[in-house]
Every structure is written in C-alpha cells, then in structure tokens.
Amino acid sequence: RMLYAGIFDGKGHSISGLYANLYDAPVEDSDYTSNKNCAGLFGSHAGVTRNLGIMDSYIRGDMCVGGICAYNDGGTIQNCYSAATVCGDSYIGGICGRSRSNSIIENCYNAGYIYGADGNIGGICGDNYSTIESCYNIGIVKGKRYVGGIVGVSSGSGNTIWIKDCYNRGNVIGDTKDIGGIGGYIGSSLVENCYSQATVSGNTNVGGICGNGYKADFQNAYYDSNLYTGNAIGYLKDA
C-alpha cells in the first residue's frame, strides 16, 4: 500500500479545495490499511505532518476517512486543523480515521462536519489506540454508534491510552448506542483535563463525557449540564 513516512511541514499554510470521493472505489482486499476507500490528504501515514490546515474541502470514503490522514500508523500529527466535510461509513475522524499505537495527535482541531453512516465516528479521531493531547473539536459529529466529540472509540490493548487537555464544543448526534461528549466508547484509557460543552443525543449508553467506559480513568473531566442534562458517563464497567 502507499505509505507516507516523510516529514510534511505546512509552515502555517493551508490547502483548499481538496476533493476526494472514494466511496465507490473498488476494494483491493479486506485489509482496511490498503483499502482504496481510505480517504484523506494522506492515506496511510507513518511520518510527521505539522503546521497545516485543510480548508473548504470534501473528503468521502468508506472505512477509514480523515481530514489529514485516513490511517495513522505510528505517525505524528502536530499543529494541524481541518475545516473539511469528512464523511463515510465507519472509522471517520476530523483529523484521522484510525490512529494506531505509537501514534501521536497533538495541538490539532477540527471545525468541519463529520458524518459516518455506521460507527467509530469522532471529531478528532474515529478509532484511536494512541495519544491525543491538546486537541479540540467545534464541528458537528454525527453517526450511528460509537460517536464522540473527540474520539468515537479509544481503546488500549495492554497499554493505557492518554487523552489529555482536550475539549469539545461540537454537538454530538448518535442514533443507537455509545455516544459521548468526549468519547463514545473509552476503554483502558486515561482521560485527563478534558471537557465537553455541547449537546449529546443517542439511545443507549449516552453521556456528557463518555457513552460507555471500560477500565477508564477520568480525572478532571467535566461537561456542561445545561447543554446535556443526563449523566457524565452513560455506562461504566471496571472489570
């Protein structure tokens, strides 16, 4: 698959008019990392992208779609923003569709409309296994399940994931389950110094901060109860 592993420094500039519609592209195989339907400025990303903005753009794919990259495979995204419309089926994020372990997303924000027809939909990252620090979302985030203002799903497998110093001010709209102001589903993660100031809607496991938490640690995490009047955590399981 095409993998970007270099250093892309936008030096504070932005890219406008990016149009990608790969929703109906043929699928190479079942591995989402090589799926042609992955859409973003970069497809698979293992390098460093920094100091860059995406403006007035439309990015559509199937599985794995993001404003900066579709699939962050150990790469670093710093000081970037997206104001693009980003949409597809699953694993949709304003900055990154999926971010795997050893990846870093920091000092980034999303201001665009994020929509996924199915699940793992997040303002910053749809499906996260990495560190997200000092990021915020102000765009509307809408999906069916596992929908969150910062992350749709954030889950560690043997390692603790850190979501730190992030906030959400974009309304989060879910259809079925696991919908939250910060994260839809958060597992084996530390959420620290984060807040959501937005409306949150869904059916089951809905929370001002997190819809569904499993072995998740929330420290100094809060939400605006005037905008969402339900519980901070929709459902929390420690073991």
Image (tube, rainbow, N blue to C red):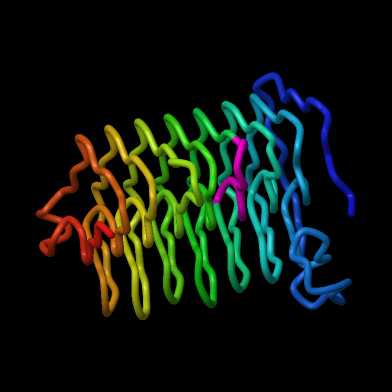
Front residue of 126/214: it is 214
Q: Is residue 24 left or right of residue 144?
A: right
The x, y position of residue 140, in whole percent, is 41, 58
Q: Quadrant of residue 179?
A: bottom left
Q: How many marks?
A: 0
Q: Residue at x 50, y 58 (%)?
A: 113
Residue 163 sits above or below residue 199 on the image: above
The quarter in which the N terminus is drawn is bottom right
> Taking 18 as reference, is 103 above or below it?
above
Q: Is residue 234 left or right of residue 181?
A: left
Q: Is residue 131 magenta?
A: no
- Residue 104, compared with residue 144, is above or below; it is above
Is-magenta flag for residue 100?
A: yes
Of 84 and 108, nearer the camera is: 108
**Magenta-tinted stretch:** 94-103
Dominant secondary-structure state across the stretch colored magenta: loop
Q: State left or right for residue 15 relative to residue 134.
A: right
Percent position of residue 72, x then y: 68, 45
Q: Tell me: 24 left or right of 207.
A: right
The residue positioned 13% from the left and 61% from the top of the image is 231
Q: Quadrant of the C terminus?
A: bottom left
Tell me which residue sits at (85%, 45%) in the image: 3
Camera-nearest residue between 58 and 217: 217
Instruction: Name the residue rendered at 60%, 43% in the picture.
Output: 101
